[in-house]
Amino acid sequence: MGLPLLVLSLPAGMLGTDLFLNRMLGGNPVTAFEAELLLLDPAIFVHVESLSIAARQLLRDRLVIGALVFVVVMTPIGLWAAWKLLFIVQRINQILRVEMVANMQAMSMRFHANARVGDSIYRTYQDSAMVTNLMGMLVQPIGPIFAGVAGFFLTFVYDWRLSLVWLGLYAAAYGMARYYTPILRRNFREARERNSALTSCIQETLSGLKVVKAYGAEPFEQARFEAASQAAFDGAYGARTNLALMGILAFILSALPGMLTATVVSVLAREGKPLAAGFALAFVGFATWNLGAYANVLGRVGSWSRGARRLIWLWGRGQDMAIGMERAFTQVDMRPEVEDAEDAVPLPDFRASVVFRGVHFGYDPRHPVLHGVDLEARAGTITALVGPTGSGKSTLVSLLLRLFDPDQGEIEIDGLDLRKIELESLRNHVSIALQENLLFATSIRENIRYAVPAASDEQVRDAARVACAGGFIDALPDGYDTMLGERGARLSTGQRQRLSIARAVIKDPRILVLDEPTASLDAETELQVMRNLAEWGRGRAIFVVTHRLSTIRRADQIVYLRDGQVVEAGSHAELMERPGGAYRRFVELERSSGLPASDPNAVRGAAS
């Protein structure tokens, strides 16, 4: 809609200028076209030597009425066009943000292990907003460009020599833009990267605030933040300084041709010389250099000069937007490492076993974590994964949910390779209680049914019962409606751990993964949780990553890992019968600590 408005406003401006200056003030007769347009009597306004006072007054009244009609007609059209543009660009921004977050969630954990959360936040919140500015800026140059083209042709018909001056201006402006573009792009990229690093610094500090306070590290974190903030300031300041410098040069560049043109036009107007193509403009009364022609050309000169300066500034500002859009679309265009195969199928009901066959994996290909892991877990059994720190236990169970894909080997459920199973179906059948016990700042009820939003209150209570969480929940003033703080900060570690188990259980999965499920529980609660899980888990496969002997001994199968390899596998009794065995040594070290085996502070031979 902007272009039609410009097309209508240009001739309207020319007519208005002529009628006001040459006719109403100067008293010159109007043209036949103008008389017909304003419904004026030709005998009084056209076929006379000059306009009478009464005719000028009538012309004034018609001009006022015409201006009011023009405003009344064009204002709602302009407002509607502005509203429509605003809606479109904001909608595009919304769609882009949604796509960015969806793509980030689809990326594998291998990607997120090497990415900074603050960078992703900055890209999604700040870089994506550039689409709004860019869409608006794509429209903004239309006015200056159209005015420049129209002004060029109009100046050409007035006097072709004037148009050459402005061709030189735009050629110089193009050269300036070519010179500054790589400089500005480099500056704006650096500024955005530094602001992204600042966002990461804030996110890391606030997420680890408990540790910061525990170690009295506030001065260190404050200094780290101030350094990152200063770097972000320096980057933004450098970029804006170059943009301002380009604007100053653009102002000087556009002022010189304007001064030259104004001088030439004033001389021509004073001498009243005929126009180069006066016949083409005779319909608005411009056949010679008169006051109206002088004012009109100077108006075009000013508009052209301002348009040139604005185009140069928009081009420089656009480099920042282009860098932001590039960073945003980089996030959108990233392809997930883990995604459905073309021939992927839903996972049938789990019946037999989960098999790891020759599995190799590394977060960094140069430093593998798992080396040819082979193991089988049958339905209706509990498999305990044991081993020293860094042996790959948590990594192994993460592969079961396809948070990563193995570099080599296969993981099969009932003989079906995980990579041939639809991701949504797989994760509906597999549930995990993570070691971090991440909870959200909502009610206990909503936290438990996070994975199953439609779960009934009865299902929530059953899951809490299995996790031995019902007792402490009922003791709270608001029970299941108790609102938790950020990351569940109002609860103890053991309580958060039981809610995490309940959240995994409520999915009613066929395969359950528990990563250090009882590390923060007392011996009595741990015993009851494991009994409940054993009863609940009939017909299911349960994997438990743990270091506690009281938990390990209840497993049907114990898999001992070391350096990313399965060293031993079997029941507790079978492994204890192996003299010098790795698992037996682990148990002996636990017992020799002199503390109860279930004590979480006992010497740990394994941790994930």
Image (cartoon, rainbow, N blue to C red):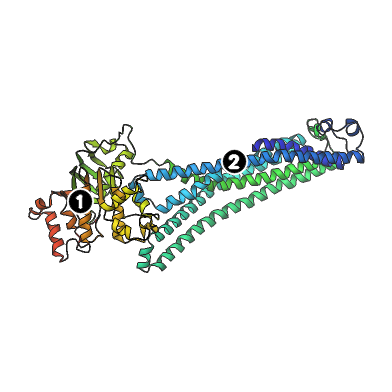
User: Residue beneath label 1, please?
Assistant: 385
In the rendered view, would you say 146 is above or below 604? above
- 342 or 258, which lies in front? 342
Label 2, residues with CA under 10 Å away: few <14, some 14-19, many ≥20: some
The answer to whether residue 414 is left or right of residue 575 is right
In the rendered view, would you say 338 is above or below 514? above
Q: Secondary structure at mark 1?
A: strand
Quadrant hosting residue 338? top left
User: Quick one: quadrant of the C terminus?
Assistant: bottom left
Q: Residue at (69%, 45%) from the top-left corner? A: 305
- Could you tell me the amino acid type at mark 2? Leu
Question: Residue 567 location in percent, x, y?
Answer: 15, 50
Q: Secondary structure at mark 2?
A: helix
Q: Is residue 417 visible?
A: yes
In the rendered view, would you say 273 is above or below 367? above
Label 1, residues with CA under 10 Å away: few <14, some 14-19, many ≥20: many
- Could you tell me the amino acid type at mark 1? Leu
The answer to whether residue 270 is left or right of residue 382 is right
- Which dot marks residue 85? 2
Question: Residue 518 location in percent, x, y?
Answer: 24, 57
- 483 or 351, which lies in front? 483
N-terminal of the two: label 1 or label 2? 2
Quadrant hosting residue 600? bottom left
Question: Residue 25 location in percent, x, y?
Answer: 86, 43
